[in-house]
Amino acid sequence: MGLSRPSLKGYFFYILCLCGLLLVVLYLRQDEIWHRMRVRPHLNMPHRELHIQVKKKFPDLPEKFYWRDISNWPEKSKKPTMQVLQTREKPKKKILSEVSNLTGTTLKRNSLEFTDPSKRPWYMKGGTRRPYPAIKSHRTGRRLARLWPDEDAYDDRVTNQLMYVPTDYNKTSAEQRLKKIMVPHGMSEAKVGPDIFIQHRCPVNTCTIVRDNPEDADLVLFKDYVTHVGRRNPNQQVWMLYFLECPYHTQSVKNAIINWTATYRRDSDIVAPYERWQYYDASITQIPQTFNYAANKTKKVAWFVSNCHPRNQRMHYARELSKYIQVDIYGTCGTLRCPRSQSQACFDMLDEDYKFYLAFENSNCKDYITEKFFVNGLRHNVLPIVMGAHPADYARSSPYRSYIHVDEFESPKELAEYLHRLDHDDELYNSYFRWKGTGEFINTYFWCRVCAMLHDDRPSKFYKDVNEWWRGDGICTTTSWREHDLVRRSANSDT
């Protein structure tokens, strides 16, 4: 007996089932691809590309939104300067929440595996992980560790240097010669001898500090200025210039062949920042907070300041801001007093009463971010408003979404409007504190890194003009960075 042929109705049923199965497979595959391609803060994506993606997905979003939250991100940014602004308007609420998924990663505190201190590197609190000897490339024979500015122009390489041990380094060998670091003046902490390298538990500790016989030194460290120390062989001795202040407050260096620089600048050979933030896990920049940082705070903006005539017009900006929001200025430049002898009481008052703090530097210079931001601002329960380095510099050096940069706004009035909005929205205000608990400020162990770098077999280098590198065109500006960038873009377009 022959098989019965399926009816038209049967064919339709089979096709319908097949289509349904295909849709399920495509949905799962699309979800997998989406999660694989999602942008995370630790991945490299130029801000222009992200700007285009967001604009295509959300064409109704105002252009001002892009400027404030995306266009300030540096090329290959790992940490955007601000997460996108939230809003109370219902039509935009969904849009902004979706955009925030492109800019940050949030995990619940109880699911974080990085909370075990013993798994952290040796330079973090409780960390026990020590570095292994550097691996060399089979093809070139060079070590893979990126230690110098030309090997990683974006990163400050601080942690790379802290975890660097030469491939053939043997600190237990009795034949290991100590590298001599000559310090002709200043730096009282640099006691003669090798003790500082032993006490700091440096992975590379076969160095010693000397104060005389410069001709025998492997490295001569000049703090703030270069002095005459006798004849030298440029091929056998390193001269390093160490600056902590900005170009406006440091001396010119003439007729000196400088091999290395040690400053707060990220393109220095040895980066010496005022503070250095390190995440426990680079992919986790936000975690939920249980503390309400806005609770019981009745005052708006505070500022502790004593230099009333800086180069960056910060006093003018603060006075203009005060026309639209309460700004309490303590110190020589204001009407209120809180003596430095009672600094702890002053900062307690900041934590308890104020929502915002003006962390304004005295100069607008590349990477110039001091304790005004890190200590007075981030180490307290107050939201810093910053002026000093370029917005892109703050984005690279700061915890994600931990501050507000004045150049994100067209005027002090516009900034004041946003501060009023934060003042009335505790949820939005508290979103600026979700970085707390995701990492810590680390000790950068300056002397450990100097010793390690002295043991690298990199060919000798020198600065053709260290003054041009330190204080050349575009390093500092007396106007805002917003105006500075507009002028440079205009000049480039004309050429």
Image (cartoon, grey):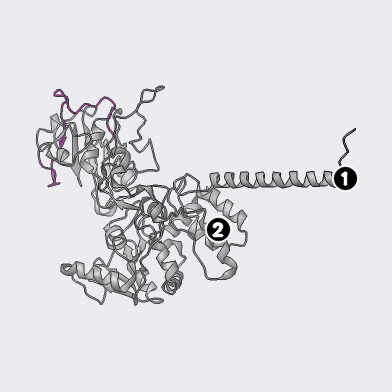
Q: Examine the structure image and report whether residue 179 is included in the region drawn in magenta.
A: yes
As drawn, 18 above or below 382: above
Q: Secondary structure at mark 2?
A: helix
Between 272 and 425, the one nearer to me in the picture: 425
Tell me if 147 is positioned left or right of 55 in this view.
left
Q: Which residue is mark 1?
A: 8
What residue appears at the point 57 percent right and 54 percent down from the top-left corner? 54
Kindly identify the amino acid type of the residue bearing the numbered disc 1: Leu
Q: Residues within 10 Å of mark 1 (few under 14, many from 20)?
A: few
The image position of residue 329, as x and y in percent, is 29, 73
The image position of residue 387, as x and y in percent, is 36, 61
Q: Secondary structure at mark 1?
A: helix
What residue appears at the point 44 percent right and 46 percent down from the top-left corner? 42
Between 192 and 402, the one nearer to me in the picture: 402
Q: Residues within 10 Å of mark 2 (few under 14, many from 20)?
A: some
Q: Which label was assigned to residue 44?
A: none
Kindly report the distance in space between the C-alpha atoms of the residues bearing marks 2 and 1: 45 Å
Q: Examine the structure image and report whether residue 351 is included in the region drawn in magenta.
A: no
Q: Which residue is mark 2?
A: 98
